[in-house]
Protein backbone atom coordinates (compact mmCIF):
# COMPACT_ATOMS: atom_id res chain seq x y z
CA UNK A 1 0.00 0.00 0.00
CA UNK A 2 1.43 3.45 -0.90
CA UNK A 3 2.86 5.34 2.07
CA UNK A 4 3.39 2.24 4.17
CA UNK A 5 6.88 1.60 5.57
CA UNK A 6 9.04 -0.99 3.84
CA UNK A 7 8.56 -3.39 6.76
CA UNK A 8 5.71 -3.73 9.30
CA UNK A 9 6.61 -2.12 12.62
CA UNK A 10 3.33 -2.11 14.60
CA UNK A 11 4.10 -4.74 17.27
CA UNK A 12 1.47 -6.79 19.10
CA UNK A 13 1.37 -9.98 21.15
CA UNK A 14 -1.44 -12.45 20.48
CA UNK A 15 -2.28 -14.93 23.19
CA UNK A 16 -3.72 -17.88 21.25
CA UNK A 17 -5.25 -21.23 22.14
CA UNK A 18 -5.01 -24.11 19.65
CA UNK A 19 -6.06 -27.77 19.63
CA UNK A 20 -3.22 -30.13 20.52
CA UNK A 21 -2.89 -31.51 17.00
CA UNK A 22 0.07 -31.62 14.57
CA UNK A 23 0.35 -28.64 12.23
CA UNK A 24 -1.81 -26.22 14.22
CA UNK A 25 0.89 -23.66 14.95
CA UNK A 26 2.40 -24.07 11.48
CA UNK A 27 -0.97 -23.32 9.85
CA UNK A 28 -1.38 -20.21 12.01
CA UNK A 29 2.08 -18.86 11.24
CA UNK A 30 1.78 -19.62 7.54
CA UNK A 31 -1.48 -17.68 7.32
CA UNK A 32 0.02 -14.72 9.17
CA UNK A 33 3.01 -14.69 6.83
CA UNK A 34 0.81 -14.87 3.74
CA UNK A 35 -0.98 -11.74 4.96
CA UNK A 36 2.29 -9.77 5.16
CA UNK A 37 2.88 -9.80 8.91
CA UNK A 38 6.20 -10.68 10.51
CA UNK A 39 6.42 -13.27 13.29
CA UNK A 40 8.69 -12.58 16.26
CA UNK A 41 8.98 -14.41 19.57
CA UNK A 42 6.78 -17.42 20.35
CA UNK A 43 6.40 -18.38 24.01
CA UNK A 44 4.47 -21.41 25.23
CA UNK A 45 2.41 -20.52 28.30
CA UNK A 46 0.43 -23.74 28.82
CA UNK A 47 0.33 -27.27 27.41
CA UNK A 48 -2.76 -29.33 28.26
CA UNK A 49 -4.10 -32.72 27.20
CA UNK A 50 -6.14 -31.30 24.34
CA UNK A 51 -4.88 -27.74 23.72
CA UNK A 52 -1.94 -25.36 24.14
CA UNK A 53 -1.71 -21.61 24.84
CA UNK A 54 1.07 -19.52 23.34
CA UNK A 55 2.08 -15.85 23.12
CA UNK A 56 2.94 -14.96 19.52
CA UNK A 57 4.58 -11.63 18.76
CA UNK A 58 3.57 -10.14 15.40
CA UNK A 59 4.57 -7.01 13.51
CA UNK A 60 1.84 -5.55 11.27
CA UNK A 61 1.61 -2.30 9.31
CA UNK A 62 -1.22 -0.57 11.16
CA UNK A 63 -4.54 -1.12 12.95
CA UNK A 64 -6.32 -1.91 9.68
CA UNK A 65 -3.75 -4.58 8.85
CA UNK A 66 -4.05 -6.01 12.37
CA UNK A 67 -7.83 -6.34 12.04
CA UNK A 68 -7.34 -8.10 8.69
CA UNK A 69 -4.94 -10.61 10.28
CA UNK A 70 -7.19 -11.21 13.30
CA UNK A 71 -10.25 -11.75 11.11
CA UNK A 72 -8.39 -14.27 8.93
CA UNK A 73 -7.14 -16.20 11.99
CA UNK A 74 -10.67 -16.44 13.37
CA UNK A 75 -12.15 -17.48 10.03
CA UNK A 76 -9.51 -19.76 8.52
CA UNK A 77 -7.94 -21.57 11.49
CA UNK A 78 -8.98 -23.40 14.65
CA UNK A 79 -7.18 -20.77 16.71
CA UNK A 80 -8.96 -18.97 19.55
CA UNK A 81 -7.54 -15.48 20.15
CA UNK A 82 -7.51 -15.10 23.92
CA UNK A 83 -5.93 -11.65 24.11
CA UNK A 84 -4.28 -8.96 21.99
CA UNK A 85 -1.68 -6.69 23.59
CA UNK A 86 -0.11 -3.65 21.97
CA UNK A 87 3.59 -3.87 22.91
CA UNK A 88 4.14 -0.12 22.60
CA UNK A 89 1.32 0.76 25.00
CA UNK A 90 2.45 -2.00 27.36
CA UNK A 91 5.94 -0.45 27.54
CA UNK A 92 4.52 3.04 28.15
CA UNK A 93 2.11 2.03 30.92
CA UNK A 94 2.76 4.20 33.97
CA UNK A 95 5.31 6.32 32.11
CA UNK A 96 8.96 5.52 31.35
CA UNK A 97 10.82 7.63 33.91
CA UNK A 98 10.82 8.56 37.59
CA UNK A 99 12.93 10.67 39.93
CA UNK A 100 15.10 8.62 42.30
CA UNK A 101 17.48 9.48 45.11
CA UNK A 102 21.25 9.08 44.81
CA UNK A 103 22.00 9.00 48.54
CA UNK A 104 20.93 6.75 51.42
CA UNK A 105 18.23 8.03 53.76
CA UNK A 106 17.69 5.48 56.54
CA UNK A 107 18.14 7.34 59.84
CA UNK A 108 17.17 10.62 61.46
CA UNK A 109 20.80 11.67 61.13
CA UNK A 110 20.50 11.27 57.35
CA UNK A 111 17.53 13.65 57.33
CA UNK A 112 19.57 16.22 59.28
CA UNK A 113 22.27 16.23 56.59
CA UNK A 114 20.31 15.92 53.35
CA UNK A 115 17.43 18.13 54.55
CA UNK A 116 16.89 20.42 57.49
CA UNK A 117 18.87 21.77 59.25
CA UNK A 118 22.05 20.80 57.37
CA UNK A 119 20.81 21.71 53.90
CA UNK A 120 20.70 25.40 54.87
CA UNK A 121 24.51 25.51 54.91
CA UNK A 122 24.65 24.32 51.30
CA UNK A 123 21.98 26.83 50.26
CA UNK A 124 23.93 29.70 51.80
CA UNK A 125 27.14 28.56 50.11
CA UNK A 126 25.43 28.53 46.69
CA UNK A 127 23.91 31.93 47.41
CA UNK A 128 27.44 33.30 47.87
CA UNK A 129 28.94 31.38 44.95
CA UNK A 130 26.35 30.16 42.36
CA UNK A 131 29.03 28.06 40.61
CA UNK A 132 28.88 25.65 43.57
CA UNK A 133 25.45 24.47 42.35
CA UNK A 134 27.25 22.28 39.79
CA UNK A 135 29.08 20.54 42.64
CA UNK A 136 26.37 20.26 45.28
CA UNK A 137 23.17 19.80 43.24
CA UNK A 138 22.14 17.74 40.24
CA UNK A 139 22.40 20.75 37.89
CA UNK A 140 25.74 19.63 36.50
CA UNK A 141 24.37 16.27 35.41
CA UNK A 142 20.81 17.15 34.43
CA UNK A 143 19.34 18.28 31.11
CA UNK A 144 15.94 19.90 30.66
CA UNK A 145 14.03 18.72 27.58
CA UNK A 146 11.62 21.46 26.45
CA UNK A 147 8.88 21.34 23.83
CA UNK A 148 5.48 22.74 22.97
CA UNK A 149 4.57 19.80 20.73
CA UNK A 150 4.05 21.90 17.61
CA UNK A 151 6.14 19.73 15.28
CA UNK A 152 6.43 16.16 16.53
CA UNK A 153 8.17 13.89 14.04
CA UNK A 154 5.63 12.09 11.90
CA UNK A 155 2.69 13.52 13.86
CA UNK A 156 2.79 17.29 13.39
CA UNK A 157 1.19 19.74 15.81
CA UNK A 158 -0.25 17.41 18.47
CA UNK A 159 0.16 19.78 21.40
CA UNK A 160 2.28 19.79 24.52
CA UNK A 161 0.70 16.99 26.56
CA UNK A 162 0.50 14.51 23.67
CA UNK A 163 4.21 15.02 23.02
CA UNK A 164 5.18 13.93 26.54
CA UNK A 165 5.78 10.24 25.63
CA UNK A 166 8.42 11.36 23.11
CA UNK A 167 10.14 13.55 25.69
CA UNK A 168 10.11 10.72 28.24
CA UNK A 169 11.76 8.54 25.60
CA UNK A 170 14.54 11.08 25.18
CA UNK A 171 15.02 11.09 28.95
CA UNK A 172 15.43 7.32 28.94
CA UNK A 173 18.12 7.58 26.25
CA UNK A 174 20.11 10.15 28.23
CA UNK A 175 20.13 7.87 31.24
CA UNK A 176 20.82 4.68 29.30
CA UNK A 177 23.63 5.92 27.09
CA UNK A 178 25.55 8.52 29.14
CA UNK A 179 24.13 8.45 32.67
CA UNK A 180 22.65 11.95 32.60
CA UNK A 181 19.37 12.81 34.24
CA UNK A 182 16.91 14.47 31.87
CA UNK A 183 13.58 16.02 32.80
CA UNK A 184 10.86 16.51 30.16
CA UNK A 185 9.09 19.87 30.40
CA UNK A 186 6.13 20.30 28.07
CA UNK A 187 5.06 23.93 27.79
CA UNK A 188 1.51 24.62 26.62
CA UNK A 189 2.50 27.78 24.75
CA UNK A 190 2.80 28.44 21.01
CA UNK A 191 3.92 32.05 21.22
CA UNK A 192 7.73 31.98 20.77
CA UNK A 193 8.43 34.89 23.13
CA UNK A 194 6.28 33.44 25.89
CA UNK A 195 7.89 30.02 25.36
CA UNK A 196 11.38 31.52 25.69
CA UNK A 197 10.40 33.46 28.80
CA UNK A 198 9.10 30.25 30.39
CA UNK A 199 12.25 28.29 29.60
CA UNK A 200 14.45 31.06 30.96
CA UNK A 201 12.57 31.05 34.26
CA UNK A 202 12.99 27.28 34.63
CA UNK A 203 16.53 27.05 33.20
CA UNK A 204 18.47 27.46 36.50
CA UNK A 205 17.41 23.91 37.38
CA UNK A 206 19.38 22.43 34.48
CA UNK A 207 22.94 22.25 33.21
CA UNK A 208 21.78 22.06 29.59
CA UNK A 209 18.68 22.96 27.57
CA UNK A 210 17.53 20.41 24.99
CA UNK A 211 14.84 21.73 22.62
CA UNK A 212 12.63 19.25 20.80
CA UNK A 213 9.73 19.11 18.34
CA UNK A 214 9.11 22.83 17.81
CA UNK A 215 7.70 24.02 14.49
CA UNK A 216 9.57 26.12 11.94
CA UNK A 217 10.33 28.97 11.76
CA UNK A 218 9.69 29.35 15.52
CA UNK A 219 12.43 26.87 16.38
CA UNK A 220 15.14 29.06 14.80
CA UNK A 221 14.24 32.18 16.77
CA UNK A 222 13.63 30.26 20.00
CA UNK A 223 17.02 28.56 19.88
CA UNK A 224 18.88 31.74 18.95
CA UNK A 225 17.17 33.73 21.71
CA UNK A 226 17.81 31.10 24.37
CA UNK A 227 21.47 30.87 23.35
CA UNK A 228 21.67 34.66 23.70
CA UNK A 229 19.95 34.79 27.09
CA UNK A 230 21.18 31.69 28.91
CA UNK A 231 24.65 30.81 30.25
CA UNK A 232 24.31 27.04 29.69
CA UNK A 233 24.43 25.07 26.41
CA UNK A 234 21.23 25.10 24.33
CA UNK A 235 20.59 22.77 21.36
CA UNK A 236 17.55 22.02 19.23
CA UNK A 237 18.00 18.29 18.65
CA UNK A 238 15.76 18.10 15.57
CA UNK A 239 18.22 20.44 13.90
CA UNK A 240 21.65 19.74 15.28
CA UNK A 241 21.40 16.16 16.48
CA UNK A 242 20.10 15.21 13.05
CA UNK A 243 22.81 17.26 11.32
CA UNK A 244 25.56 15.65 13.40
CA UNK A 245 24.51 12.10 12.58
CA UNK A 246 23.97 13.01 8.92
CA UNK A 247 27.49 14.42 8.72
CA UNK A 248 28.74 11.14 10.20
CA UNK A 249 26.81 9.30 7.47
CA UNK A 250 28.36 11.49 4.76
CA UNK A 251 31.86 10.86 6.10
CA UNK A 252 31.21 7.12 6.12
CA UNK A 253 29.79 7.16 2.59
CA UNK A 254 32.88 9.00 1.37
CA UNK A 255 35.03 6.34 2.99
CA UNK A 256 33.01 3.55 1.40
CA UNK A 257 33.39 5.14 -2.06
CA UNK A 258 37.13 5.82 -1.80
CA UNK A 259 36.85 9.56 -1.15
CA UNK A 260 37.75 9.66 2.54
CA UNK A 261 39.01 13.05 3.67
CA UNK A 262 37.67 14.89 0.63
CA UNK A 263 36.05 18.26 1.24
CA UNK A 264 36.26 19.69 -2.31
CA UNK A 265 32.83 18.25 -3.02
CA UNK A 266 29.36 19.69 -3.61
CA UNK A 267 26.52 18.64 -1.31
CA UNK A 268 22.98 19.30 -2.47
CA UNK A 269 20.57 19.65 0.45
CA UNK A 270 17.00 19.21 -0.82
CA UNK A 271 14.62 20.61 1.77
CA UNK A 272 15.64 23.46 4.08
CA UNK A 273 13.32 22.95 7.02
CA UNK A 274 14.69 22.71 10.55
CA UNK A 275 16.71 19.54 9.93
CA UNK A 276 17.67 20.35 6.34
CA UNK A 277 18.96 23.81 7.12
CA UNK A 278 20.98 22.53 10.09
CA UNK A 279 22.46 19.80 7.89
CA UNK A 280 23.43 22.38 5.27
CA UNK A 281 25.02 24.65 7.88
CA UNK A 282 27.05 21.87 9.46
CA UNK A 283 28.22 20.63 6.06
CA UNK A 284 29.41 24.18 5.34
CA UNK A 285 31.20 24.31 8.70
CA UNK A 286 32.81 20.95 7.91
CA UNK A 287 34.28 22.39 4.70
CA UNK A 288 31.89 21.22 1.99
CA UNK A 289 30.30 23.40 -0.68
CA UNK A 290 26.53 23.36 -0.24
CA UNK A 291 23.74 24.13 -2.66
CA UNK A 292 20.22 24.12 -1.21
CA UNK A 293 16.80 23.47 -2.70
CA UNK A 294 13.57 24.71 -1.14
CA UNK A 295 10.40 26.43 -2.38
CA UNK A 296 10.45 28.83 0.59
CA UNK A 297 12.16 32.16 0.07
CA UNK A 298 12.91 32.58 3.79
CA UNK A 299 14.55 29.14 3.91
CA UNK A 300 16.73 29.90 0.91
CA UNK A 301 17.69 33.26 2.37
CA UNK A 302 18.75 31.64 5.65
CA UNK A 303 21.12 29.30 3.81
CA UNK A 304 22.55 32.05 1.63
CA UNK A 305 23.21 34.15 4.74
CA UNK A 306 25.40 31.32 6.03
CA UNK A 307 27.44 31.07 2.82
CA UNK A 308 25.51 28.43 0.89
CA UNK A 309 24.05 28.68 -2.59
CA UNK A 310 20.54 27.80 -3.80
CA UNK A 311 19.29 26.28 -7.03
CA UNK A 312 16.46 24.33 -8.59
CA UNK A 313 16.19 20.62 -7.83
CA UNK A 314 17.40 19.74 -11.32
CA UNK A 315 20.30 22.19 -11.14
CA UNK A 316 21.44 21.07 -7.70
CA UNK A 317 21.22 17.37 -8.55
CA UNK A 318 23.21 17.90 -11.74
CA UNK A 319 26.26 19.27 -9.89
CA UNK A 320 26.06 17.42 -6.59
CA UNK A 321 28.59 14.82 -5.54
CA UNK A 322 26.37 14.09 -2.53
CA UNK A 323 22.58 14.39 -2.86
CA UNK A 324 20.67 14.64 0.43
CA UNK A 325 16.88 14.93 0.74
CA UNK A 326 14.78 15.68 3.84
CA UNK A 327 11.45 16.72 2.32
CA UNK A 328 8.94 14.00 3.17
CA UNK A 329 7.86 13.97 -0.49
CA UNK A 330 7.70 10.38 -1.74
CA UNK A 331 9.28 9.96 -5.19
CA UNK A 332 10.64 13.50 -5.36
CA UNK A 333 14.06 12.23 -6.49
CA UNK A 334 13.50 10.43 -9.78
CA UNK A 335 16.10 8.06 -11.26
CA UNK A 336 16.75 10.60 -14.01
CA UNK A 337 18.07 13.08 -11.41
CA UNK A 338 20.72 10.67 -10.12
CA UNK A 339 24.20 11.22 -11.53
CA UNK A 340 26.58 8.25 -11.99
CA UNK A 341 28.97 8.01 -9.06
CA UNK A 342 26.77 10.16 -6.80
CA UNK A 343 26.13 9.47 -3.11
CA UNK A 344 22.38 9.61 -2.48
CA UNK A 345 20.95 9.91 1.05
CA UNK A 346 17.15 10.17 0.92
CA UNK A 347 16.21 10.48 4.57
CA UNK A 348 12.44 10.90 4.83
CA UNK A 349 10.62 8.22 6.82
CA UNK A 350 8.81 5.93 6.46
CA UNK A 351 9.16 6.19 2.67
CA UNK A 352 12.17 8.07 1.22
CA UNK A 353 12.31 10.47 -1.73
CA UNK A 354 13.95 7.65 -3.69
CA UNK A 355 14.66 4.11 -2.52
CA UNK A 356 18.30 3.04 -2.22
CA UNK A 357 17.63 0.28 -4.74
CA UNK A 358 16.31 2.74 -7.33
CA UNK A 359 19.19 5.16 -6.75
CA UNK A 360 21.79 2.41 -7.15
CA UNK A 361 20.08 1.14 -10.29
CA UNK A 362 20.28 4.69 -11.69
CA UNK A 363 24.06 4.77 -11.18
CA UNK A 364 24.61 6.02 -7.64
CA UNK A 365 27.87 4.86 -6.08
CA UNK A 366 26.25 4.62 -2.66
CA UNK A 367 22.66 5.09 -1.50
CA UNK A 368 20.82 4.86 1.80
CA UNK A 369 17.56 5.94 3.42
CA UNK A 370 16.87 7.52 6.80
CA UNK A 371 16.61 4.37 8.90
CA UNK A 372 20.20 4.64 10.12
CA UNK A 373 20.20 8.38 10.90
CA UNK A 374 19.40 8.09 14.61
CA UNK A 375 19.81 11.22 16.74
CA UNK A 376 20.47 9.02 19.78
CA UNK A 377 24.01 8.61 18.47
CA UNK A 378 24.72 12.31 18.95
CA UNK A 379 22.73 14.27 21.53
CA UNK A 380 23.60 12.23 24.67
CA UNK A 381 27.36 12.50 24.14
CA UNK A 382 27.21 16.13 23.01
CA UNK A 383 25.43 17.24 26.17
CA UNK A 384 27.43 14.96 28.48
CA UNK A 385 30.71 16.38 27.20
CA UNK A 386 29.41 19.95 27.34
CA UNK A 387 28.33 19.52 30.96
CA UNK A 388 31.57 17.75 31.90
CA UNK A 389 33.73 20.67 30.77
CA UNK A 390 31.28 23.44 31.68
CA UNK A 391 30.94 24.59 28.07
CA UNK A 392 28.57 27.56 27.67
CA UNK A 393 27.49 26.41 24.21
CA UNK A 394 27.55 23.44 21.84
CA UNK A 395 29.61 24.68 18.90
CA UNK A 396 29.96 23.53 15.31
CA UNK A 397 33.44 22.25 16.14
CA UNK A 398 31.93 20.02 18.84
CA UNK A 399 29.30 18.69 16.43
CA UNK A 400 31.90 17.99 13.73
CA UNK A 401 34.03 16.16 16.30
CA UNK A 402 31.02 14.08 17.33
CA UNK A 403 30.26 13.22 13.70
CA UNK A 404 33.83 12.10 13.07
CA UNK A 405 33.75 9.94 16.20
CA UNK A 406 30.46 8.32 15.17
CA UNK A 407 31.64 7.66 11.62
CA UNK A 408 34.90 6.11 12.82
CA UNK A 409 32.95 3.29 14.51
CA UNK A 410 30.62 2.53 11.58
CA UNK A 411 30.90 -1.12 10.44
CA UNK A 412 31.89 -1.96 6.87
CA UNK A 413 29.22 -0.89 4.38
CA UNK A 414 27.19 0.80 7.13
CA UNK A 415 26.90 4.56 7.58
CA UNK A 416 26.85 4.70 11.39
CA UNK A 417 27.13 2.25 14.29
CA UNK A 418 24.21 1.16 16.43
CA UNK A 419 23.37 3.46 19.37
CA UNK A 420 24.02 0.34 21.47
CA UNK A 421 27.61 -0.02 20.23
CA UNK A 422 29.59 -0.46 23.47
CA UNK A 423 32.08 2.31 22.67
CA UNK A 424 30.24 4.89 20.59
CA UNK A 425 29.01 7.25 23.31
CA UNK A 426 32.30 7.32 25.21
CA UNK A 427 34.04 7.87 21.87
CA UNK A 428 31.76 10.84 21.16
CA UNK A 429 32.19 12.28 24.67
CA UNK A 430 35.99 12.10 24.42
CA UNK A 431 36.06 13.76 20.99
CA UNK A 432 33.61 16.51 21.98
CA UNK A 433 35.49 17.26 25.20
CA UNK A 434 38.67 17.74 23.19
CA UNK A 435 36.90 20.01 20.68
CA UNK A 436 35.32 22.06 23.49
CA UNK A 437 38.72 22.65 25.05
CA UNK A 438 40.28 24.13 21.90
Image (cartoon, rainbow, N blue to C red):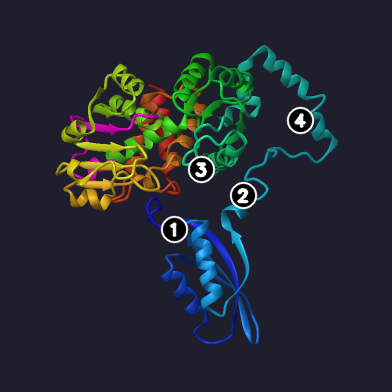
Per the image, the residue denoted by label 2 is: 92
Counting residues from the start of the chain, the first of labels 2 and 1 encountered is 1
**Left or right of 104 on screen, residue 229:** left
Counting residues from the start of the chain, the first of labels 3 and 1 encountered is 1
Per the image, the residue denoted by label 4 is: 114
From where the camera sits, is residue 402 visible?
no
Counting residues from the start of the chain, the first of labels 4 and 1 encountered is 1
From where the camera sits, is residue 256 visible?
yes
Marks 2 and 1 sit apart, C-alpha to C-alpha, by 20 Å
Counting residues from the start of the chain, the first of labels 3 and 2 encountered is 2
Dot 2, crowdedness within 10 Å: few (<14), some or many (≥20)?
few
Marks 3 and 4 sit apart, C-alpha to C-alpha, by 28 Å
Residue 437's x, y, as percent? 41, 23
Which segment did they paint magenta? 252-273
Marks 3 and 2 sit apart, C-alpha to C-alpha, by 19 Å
Residue 385 badge: none
For the point 35% across and 23% down, which residue is it?
299
- Image: 422 above or below 28: above
**Left or right of 377 on screen, residue 309:** left
Per the image, the residue denoted by label 1 is: 8
For the point 61% across and 61% down, which residue is it?
85
Marks 2 and 4 sit apart, C-alpha to C-alpha, by 32 Å
* Residue 84, quarter of the rendered image: bottom right
Front position in the image: 173 or 296:
296
Per the image, the residue denoted by label 3 is: 177
Dot 1, crowdedness within 10 Å: few (<14), some or many (≥20)?
some
- In the rendered view of the protein, which quadrant contains the C terminus? top left
Amino acid sequence: MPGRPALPDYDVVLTVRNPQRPGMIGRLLGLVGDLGALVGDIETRYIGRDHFVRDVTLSVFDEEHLEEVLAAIRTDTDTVIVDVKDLVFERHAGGKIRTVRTTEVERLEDLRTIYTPGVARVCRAIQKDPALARQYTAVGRTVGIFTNGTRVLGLGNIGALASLPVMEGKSVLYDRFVGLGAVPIVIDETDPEAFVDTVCRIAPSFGGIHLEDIRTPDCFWIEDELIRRLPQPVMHDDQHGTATVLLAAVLSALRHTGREGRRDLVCAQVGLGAAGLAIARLLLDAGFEVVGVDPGEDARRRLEARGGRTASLEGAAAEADILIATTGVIGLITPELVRPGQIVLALSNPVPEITPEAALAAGAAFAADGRSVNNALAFPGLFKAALDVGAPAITSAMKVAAAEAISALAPDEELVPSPFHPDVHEHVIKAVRAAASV
